[in-house]
C-alpha cells in the first residue's frame, strides 16, 4: 500500500513536470496573471482589468510589461479627414486619438476639417537624430581635455562599433563636450522606423566599452547617460536642434473659412498669438505653443508610442501671421517628435489596429507618422486659439463634458 502511494506521488510529479514542459507561453502568462490576482483578492477589479481579451493577449504583452495583471481600456475617437501634403505625396488621414478628456477629439476634428477645407497642410521632417549622452569623470581638466581630443580623433572608428550592434541604425556623430573635469559625449543616431530609445542605449554601451579599452587616460568613473540628451524632458537646447525627428507643418487658411468655421478672424487670432507668446515668456515656457501635449498624448497612446516621450515631444513653436490678402498663415515646429512604426508597443493588438487605420503600420512609415503628429498638433492649435478668440472655449467644455446646451456669448 505504501509503495502504491509512493508510485502515485511520483506519477503526479512527472505529470506536473511534463505539463510545465509542454505549457505554451500563452498558458504560462495567463497562469502567472491568475496567481497575481489570487494574491490581490480583488475580484471586482479583476473583472474590469483581466477580461477575456486581456487573458487571450497575455503572452503578447510579455515584452512590454512586467508583473502583468490586465489592461486598461481608454476610449478612442476618430479625427478626420486630415489632408497632409507630406514628403511622399498627399494623403487624407483618419487619425485615432485615445483620451478621457471630453472636447479634445471634437476640437482636433474641427481643426482637421478646417485644414482639409483649406486644401490641407504641408508637413516635413527636416532633421533626424536620437541621442544618448554618456559622461566620463576625470581627476583633472587636463585629462578631460586629452580624452575629448581622443574621441574627436577617433570618431570615424565608432561607426563600425554601432554596425556590430544593430543593422537598423547608424551613428551620425560623436561630439565631446567638456564641463569641468567631466566629458559628456553627445552620441547621435539615425534609427530608421523605430523610435530607437533601446537601440541607441545598446549601441552607446558598446561604444563606451570600446572607448574604455583604448582611452589614453582612465576615467575615475562613467555613466551611460549623463542627462545631457534631454530624454523624457523639455529642454531649451533641443528647441533649436533635434531629438528624434524635427517636424514642421504649415498651412494658409482663407479668411472666410476662419470666419465660418472658427467664428473669429485671422487678425484676432494673431492678436491672441502675440498675447500668449508674451504670457509664455513671462511663465518661462520652453517654446511658444498652446497644448501640444493634448494631441500628442492621445496619438501616442492610441498608436503604441512611448507615452512618457510626450514630456519632450510637446515642445515647439506655434506661429500665426496674417497675409497681405488678409488670410491666416499658421505653422508649428516640433523638434522632439519621438515616434516609430516598428518595435516598442507598436505591435500590440490595439496599437497595431490604430496604426492600420492610419495606414502606417510597419517599415517605411515612421516619417509619415511624424508628419501626422505635426499636422494633428497644427489642427489643435488652430482650434483652441479659435475657441479662445470666439469665446467658445468654456462653452464647448460645458456642453461636451456636462451636456449643457450651447450658448455662445457675445
Image: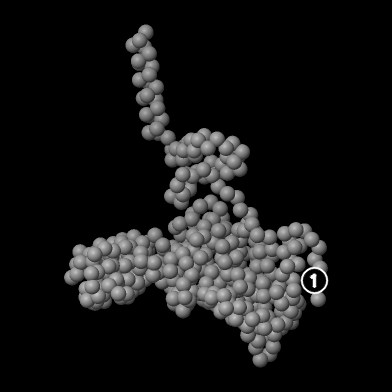
Q: Residue at 57% across / 58% down in the picture?
A: 302
Snapshot quadrant of residue 137: bottom left
* Image location (x, y in percent) of residue 81: 65, 68
* Image location (x, y in percent) of residue 408: 80, 71
Snapshot quadrant of residue 208: bottom left
Question: Pointer 1: residues within 10 angstroms few (<14), some, or many (20+)?
Answer: few
Q: Residue at 48% across / 55% down in the picture?
A: 345
Q: Residue at 43% across / 40% down in the picture?
A: 25
Q: Nearer the viewer, residue 92 or 233?
A: 233
Looking at the rendered image, the quarter that the C terminus falls into is bottom right
Dot 1: element: loop
Q: Is residue 317 above or below residue 212?
A: below
Is 4 left or right of 136, judged from the image as shown?
right
Is 333 left or right of 75, judged from the image as shown?
left
Q: Nearer the viewer, residue 410 or 400?
A: 410
Looking at the rendered image, the quarter that the N terminus falls into is top left
Q: Nearer the viewer, residue 150 or 278?
A: 278
Snapshot quadrant of residue 191: bottom left
* Image location (x, y in percent) of residue 385: 67, 75
Q: Residue at 59% across / 41% down in the picture?
A: 45
* Image location (x, y in percent) of residue 59: 47, 44
Residue 163 in view (yes/no):
no
Spot the residue most to the bottom. 324
Pointer 1: what residue? 408
Is 198 left or right of 248, judged from the image as shown?
left
Amino acid at each position: 500500500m505504501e509503495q502504491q502511494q509512493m508510485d502515485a506521488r511520483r506519477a503526479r510529479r512527472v505529470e506536473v513536470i511534463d505539463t510545465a514542459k509542454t505549457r505554451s507561453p500563452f498558458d504560462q502568462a495567463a497562469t502567472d496573471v491568475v496567481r497575481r490576482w489570487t494574491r490581490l483578492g480583488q475580484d471586482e477589479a479583476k473583472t474590469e482589468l483581466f477580461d477575456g481579451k486581456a487573458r487571450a493577449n497575455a503572452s503578447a504583452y510579455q515584452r512590454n510589461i512586467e508583473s502583468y495583471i490586465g489592461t486598461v481600456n481608454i476610449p478612442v475617437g476618430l479625427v478626420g479627414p486630415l489632408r497632409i501634403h507630406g514628403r511622399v505625396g498627399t494623403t487624407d488621414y483618419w487619425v485615432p486619438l485615445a483620451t478621457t478628456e471630453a472636447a479634445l477629439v471634437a476640437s482636433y476634428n474641427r481643426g482637421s476639417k478646417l485644414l482639409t477645407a483649406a486644401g490641407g497642410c504641408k508637413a516635413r521632417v527636416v532633421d533626424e537624430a536620437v541621442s544618448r549622452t554618456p559622461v566620463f569623470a576625470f581627476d583633472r581638466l587636463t585629462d578631460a581635455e586629452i580624452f575629448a581630443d581622443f574621441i574627436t580623433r577617433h570618431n570615424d572608428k565608432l561607426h563600425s562599433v554601432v554596425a556590430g550592434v544593430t543593422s537598423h541604425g547608424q551613428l551620425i556623430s560623436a561630439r565631446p563636450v567638456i564641463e569641468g573635469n567631466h566629458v559628456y559625449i553627445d552620441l547621435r543616431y539615425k534609427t530608421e522606423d523605430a523610435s530607437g530609445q533601446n537601440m541607441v542605449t545598446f549601441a552607446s554601451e558598446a561604444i563606451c566599452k570600446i572607448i574604455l579599452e583604448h582611452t589614453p587616460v582612465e576615467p575615475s568613473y562613467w555613466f551611460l547617460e549623463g542627462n545631457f540628451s534631454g530624454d523624457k524632458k523639455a529642454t531649451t537646447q533641443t528647441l533649436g536642434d533635434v531629438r528624434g525627428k524635427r517636424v514642421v507643418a504649415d498651412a494658409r487658411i482663407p479668411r472666410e473659412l476662419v470666419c465660418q468655421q472658427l467664428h473669429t478672424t485671422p487678425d484676432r487670432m494673431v492678436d491672441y498669438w502675440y498675447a500668449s507668446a508674451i504670457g509664455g515668456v513671462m511663465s518661462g515656457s520652453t517654446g511658444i505653443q498652446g497644448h501640444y501635449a493634448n494631441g500628442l498624448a492621445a496619438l501616442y497612446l492610441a498608436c503604441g508610442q512611448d507615452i512618457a516621450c510626450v514630456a519632450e515631444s510637446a515642445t515647439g513653436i506655434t506661429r500665426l501671421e496674417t497675409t497681405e490678402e488678409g488670410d491666416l498663415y499658421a505653422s508649428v515646429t516640433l523638434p522632439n517628435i519621438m515616434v516609430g512604426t516598428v518595435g516598442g508597443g507598436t505591435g500590440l493588438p490595439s496599437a497595431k489596429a490604430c496604426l492600420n487605420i492610419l495606414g502606417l503600420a510597419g517599415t517605411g512609415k515612421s516619417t509619415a507618422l511624424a508628419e501626422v503628429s505635426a499636422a494633428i498638433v497644427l489642427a489643435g492649435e488652430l482650434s483652441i486659439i479659435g475657441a479662445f478668440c470666439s469665446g467658445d472655449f468654456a462653452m464647448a467644455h460645458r456642453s461636451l463634458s456636462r451636456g449643457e446646451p450651447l450658448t455662445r456669448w457675445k
